[in-house]
Image (cartoon, rainbow, N blue to C red):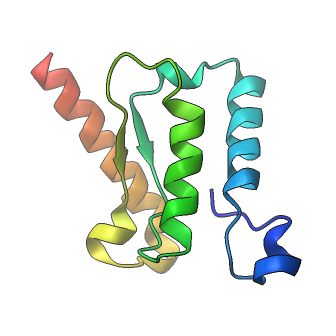
Amino acid sequence: MYTHGYTLIVKGITFPSGAVQKTLMLGVYEECGIRPVDITYVEAHGTGTKAGDPEEVNSIADVFCKGRQSPLLIGSTKSNMGHPEPASGKFSFCCVQHFISTCLCIS
């Protein structure tokens, strides 16, 4: 969810755009026919920066938290263990898999 969009001219190429992230997330979930309020966990990019994290978390909150009755859990392998480079997808998948198995064991 780390997209740049229109902030390129105003804030520079490396500054993330929460508005573009929000648009992307809404479009993906709408196209898939999934209501964002039904999502229980989001694996975030988690840059660990003052510029990136607020943009990302605010866009996640805007998309997934409106009308929500239960908490939305947010995780990030990068903020917990550093940038895993080419294996980042695998670590994110393992994190989500652990979350799902833990929730199923609790239920």
Decide which of 50, 78 is in the foreground and name it: 50
Q: Say if 75 sits above or below 33 in the image.
A: below
Q: Name the quadrant containing residue 105.
A: top left
Which residue is at a point 33% across and 51% down the rendered structure image?
94
In the picture shown, does residue 80 fall above or below 13?
above
Q: Nearer the viewer, residue 42 or 17?
A: 17
**Image quadrant containing the C terminus:** top left
Number of numbered callouts drawn: 0
Residue 68 position, x and y percent, is 44, 20
Name the residue: 48% across, 65% down: 53
Does 18 sit left or right of 49 as displayed?
Answer: right
* Extreme residue in the left direction: 106
In this rendering, is residue 42 above or below 9? above
Q: Percent from the top left, x then y, of residue 41?
A: 39, 36
Compared to residue 97, the image places residue 52 above or below, namely below
Q: Is residue 69 left or right of residue 50?
A: left
Q: What residue is shown at x 25% (from left), y 43% (from top)?
A: 98
Question: Where is the N terminus found, in terms of image quarters?
Answer: bottom right
Which residue is painted at 21% across and 27% down in the image? 103
